[in-house]
Image (cartoon, rainbow, N blue to C red):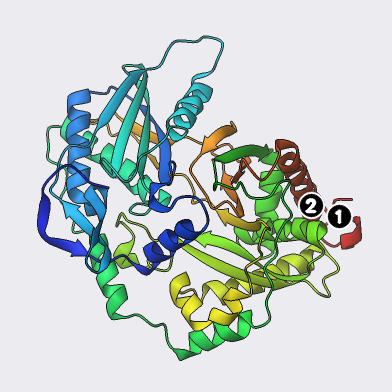
Amino acid sequence: MGQGTSAVDGSHFALSLEQEFLRAQHEHDGSAGDSAPRLISSGGWRLTGELDLALFERALSDVVARHEALRTSVVVGPDGLRQQVHAPATPPLEVRDLPHDPDVPRDERAEHFLNEIEGGTWEVGEGPAFRAFLGRFDDRDAVLVLVAHLLVVDVWSLSIVARDITTAYQARAAGREPEAADIPAYRDYAAKQAAQRGAGEKVHAFWRDKLRGAEAIALTADRPPAPDGVTGTRCDRFLLDAELGAATREFAKASRCSLFMVLFAAYRLHLLRRTGMRDGVVWTLTSGPGRRDRWMENTVGYFVNMFPLRTDLAGCTTFREVVERTKATCVEALSREIPFVELASQASDAIGQLERGGMVVPGFQMSPYPLSVRAESAGGLSCTQVQRRLSQEFGPDIPDDAILWTAEVAHSGELLFAVNSSIDRYDRETIAGMMAEFHAALRDGVGEPDAPLADIAR
């Protein structure tokens, strides 16, 4: 994945543990590794206010200079894959005028624009690692779409990028240089991780014990894997109304747990109905142990960590008890989170037993709360994340043997869900059935948390 610019002297460095896992996962799952057509991170933001394109391009250049990951490529060296940082340069910016359509609200047209960009084919092995697209409704209303190679920049990082582009633009529109910031580079994280590899025997012993004898919860697909590998990932979206969203948040607060824990409990109950497995592992994606280090909170890179949550629901008779059991699982596991590559090396036998050939492994994650940047009086530009309700036929790639649910809280208080799955494995009707089962489990569980489980979602 070359940048087309000269490299910074001495800028080669090794992949982080998280990057090593992502590459290995896609290399062996049939989705074509780092040549997958949609192995990307992406996101969209609504820009409101007077927009000067020349200043905007300067702001883009400011941010690319600030964050090395936006000008990093992955190259093959004598010792395997390495990362190479290139000299600062203005990234490609494609500007489009979005056609006027009085019958379709602008919010919906913004979603269409983002879905269209994501649905394109990306030759991530060539060209810049980071690209920007600007769809303009008029001179004061636009949609910014950012796309990056997933192996280098994760989705969480793109919110940082969007924030920094907006603040840099505000500064330049006010006639000042953007404020300098002492932000650690991703290479600093990779170097520190390599020097401190190993979380300690107590943490390793916990995971060996926790995963001993574990089984992965897995689902039967409508069809077997495609013989030539994955041909695309579909994203089906649905929403739960603001009233249920508010009730779920209130229940989480009263139960002294996070919203993720309550939603994950409902998802776990949904899986229990589907598989009959009371004790099993479900995977989640977190922003990563590195991202939670304040030293790295404003660094752009790939920090995402895949993580096992083993919950045994044996003896649970009510939804409240399922939530309590889920809460205990999350607290003990996430407080001992380590990169998956390290976890696998310490519990290799247990991890190996979690493979389920021909089956589809479910995952559930919570998207971070949406980032917004308000307009400064001098800069006049505000930035609000686009939150999508529209399904799309093609989205960013995930492994062929996975189905990933992502939950998000809308600005309006609704709960938004995206379900990503291989178009080869599931029919839309099957996904719709899963959504309906989850909705019923959450609605009934939050509504009557002490009712017998047998009466929930039946």
Regarding residue 264, the answer to whether it shows in the image is: yes
x and y percentages locating residue 408 in the rendered image = 56, 46
Residue closer to the observer: 17 or 413? 17
| Outermost residue to the front | 227
Q: Is mark 2 on a helix, strand or loop?
A: helix
Q: Is residue 198 above or below residue 107?
A: below
Residue drawn at x 66%, y 38% as measured from the top left = 239
Q: Residue 242 carries which label?
A: none
Relative to 418, is 360 above or below?
below
Where residue 139 appears, as percent x and y from the top left, is: 31, 17
Residue 98 in the image, given as x and y percentages of width and height:
40, 16
Residue at 31% across / 63% down in the picture?
296
Closer to the camera, 320 or 103?
Answer: 103
Amino acid tagged 2 = Ala
Tag 1, which secondary structure?
A: loop
- Residue receiving disc 2: 441
Q: Is 407 displayed left or right of 137 in the figure? A: right
Q: Name the residue under label 1.
A: 456
Question: Mark 2 touching mark 1, by CB under 8 A?
Answer: yes
| Vertical arrangement, residue 347 with respect to residue 105, above or below | below
Q: In this view, does 82 lie to the left or right of 219?
A: left
Answer left or right for 437 relative to 71.
right
Residue 377 found in image quarter: top left
Q: Distance between the residues labelled 2 and 1?
A: 6 Å
Label total for image: 2
Residue type at tag 1: Ile
Tell me if mark 2 has few (under 14), some (14-19) or many (20+) residues whose alpha carbon lies within 10 angstroms of its own: many
Q: Which of marks 2 and 1 is nearer the N terminus?
A: 2
User: Viewer-proximal residue, 91 or 22?
Assistant: 22
> Residue at left 82%, top 51%?
444
Q: Is residue 230 left or right of residue 242?
A: left
Q: Determine which quarter of the picture holds residue 288.
A: bottom left
